Amino acid sequence: MRKVNISQVSETAQHSPKGAFAVFRKHISLALGGLKDVGVFGGGHPFDLELVRVPPNRAAWPFHSHSAQWELYVIISGKAEVRTSAETVAVGAGDVFIHPPEEAHQLRNIGSDDLVYYVIADHALADVAHYPDSGKWFTKPQRKSFRMLEADYFDGEE
């Protein structure tokens, strides 16, 4: 058994260049010996657990969907809006929701205090995230962002 106290897990910060996105994360699964974006197929855990904190008037991440990954959210404190392709829903402390693969989503802190939540995400062998607002794609475990250029299947092959 591996055990860690969340108070002992260091917090990492990530901010977008213009400040629209800001997130502070405690990578609990990594503290327990997991590997970033690697499931049991590569010696990691079958899922990731993070404690996330988002400042007021910020979103943690841009609007996106995953091709293979499920994400389960447990709101601990604060107020947020969850945007999906179909609707925007207010959530707060005690609310729990799940996003299946292919469902675009984004959480935005709409309160005056930090939004704090747990997120649990499973690990597929590979995952491709799509960002509908910008037309970008992101691959895991490679961790590369790109925009696609459509090409014929055999282009450059012969």
Image (spheres, rainbow, N blue to C red):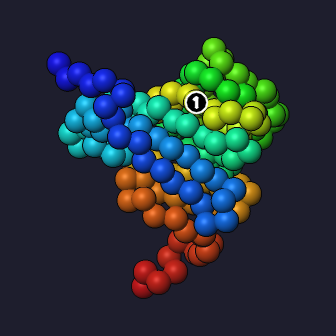
| Secondary structure at numbered mark 1 | strand
Which residue is at the front of the view, 110 or 84?
Answer: 110
x, y (%) of residue 127?
46, 47
Residue 149: x %, y % from top left: 61, 74
In this rendering, position of residue 144 left or right of residue 129: left
Q: Is residue 103 visible?
A: no
Residue at image point 50% right, 76% down: 154
Please tell me whether residue 140 is drawn above or below residue 46 in the rendered image: below
Residue 100 against residue 149 in the figure, above or below: above
Q: Residue furthest top?
A: 94
Q: Which residue occupies 47% across, 32% down? A: 51
Residue 13 is situated, as x and y percent measured from the top left of the image, at: 48, 50
Label 1: few (<14), some or many (≥20) within 10 Å?
A: many
Residue drawn 23% across the image and 43% down it:
42
Give whichever of 52, 39 is nearer the camera. 52
- Residue found at the far left of this picture: 1
- Quarter of the picture containing the C terminus is bottom left
The image quadrant of residue 135 is bottom right
* Residue 63 in view in this figure: yes
Quarter of the figure with the N terminus: top left
Three-letter residue code for mark 1: Val
Asked where in the image residue 92 lies, by quadrant, the reply is top right
Q: Residue furthest right?
A: 87
In screen coordinates, is 51 left or right of 31?
right
Choose top left, top right, bottom left or bottom right for residue 28.
top left
Q: Position of residue 45 (x, y in %)?
A: 29, 32
User: Which residue position holds label 1?
Assistant: 116
Q: Nearer the viewer, residue 128 or 79?
A: 79
